[in-house]
Amino acid sequence: MSRKKPEVEEDELALFREAMRDVRPLQAPERVEHRRRPKPVPRFRLADESNALLESLREDPFRSELETGEELLYLRAGENPRLLRRLRRGEFPIAAELDLHGLTEQRAGIAIREFLAEAQRERWQCVRIIHGKGLRSGPDGPVLKPKTASVLRRRDDVLAFANARPVDGGTGAVLVLLRRR
């Protein structure tokens, strides 16, 4: 069944056109571009990550191993244990020394790194770092001694280190044996 559209009579069409004679089309409004919202910033997560990073730089995994009078000993894996024995006996001539007394923990770390860089440039084999015994450090114990051990353990150019002989500073200083380049 098909339906036919009703035919509009001419009178009605003329009437409609007469009514619409003064009508003008509306102008399209300017297009509005909505700015996209910026992605949210995970402030708390970023703060947590930042705090964790700062804590990891402060925390020393080797700190709990050290007390005021304890001995520092380290030999890089794969190195001959004879090197450590010779170092402890003082068989290597000390080319230079660095005294950390009076420095903050952070400044001491920087000073050690700079000193070891100079040692590599000058091709020194054995150096002494005086960190002190930490006797006046308070209830938390020594600060510079564990910092020194931590920095030295992380360096590829350090073959071994040990407390100096009593005549060279004892437990207040460490002798460092460096890899020659």
Image (spheres, grey):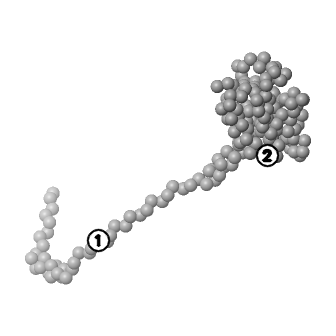
Residue 40, image x and y in percent? 54, 56
What's the residue type where badge 1 is placed?
Ala
Do the residues bearing badges 2 and 1 touch, measured as CB atoms within 8 Å?
no
Q: Residues within 10 Å of mark 2 (few under 14, many from 20)?
A: few
Give the camera-side residue of 131 and 61.
131
What secondary structure is marked by label 1? loop
Residue 126, image x and y in percent? 75, 27
Q: Is residue 18 left or right of residue 174?
A: left
- C-alpha separation, residue under disc 2 versus residue under disc 1: 73 Å
Residue 148, image x and y in percent? 77, 36
The quadrant where residue 144 appears: top right
- Identify the residue at horizontal 71%, vertical 22% (top origin): 77
Please report whichever mark, 2 or 1, sits nearer to the chain's N-terminal start.
1
Q: Is residue 148 left or right of residue 71?
A: left
Give the camera-side residue of 55 and 124.
124
Residue 34, image x and y in percent? 41, 64
Q: Which mark is residue 28?
A: 1
Give the camera-side residue of 150 and 140.
150
What secondary structure is marked by label 2? loop
Can residue 176 be spotted in the picture? no
What's the residue type where badge 2 is placed?
Leu
- Identify the residue at horizontal 64%, vertical 25% (top origin): 181
Name the residue that disc number 2 marks. Answer: 103
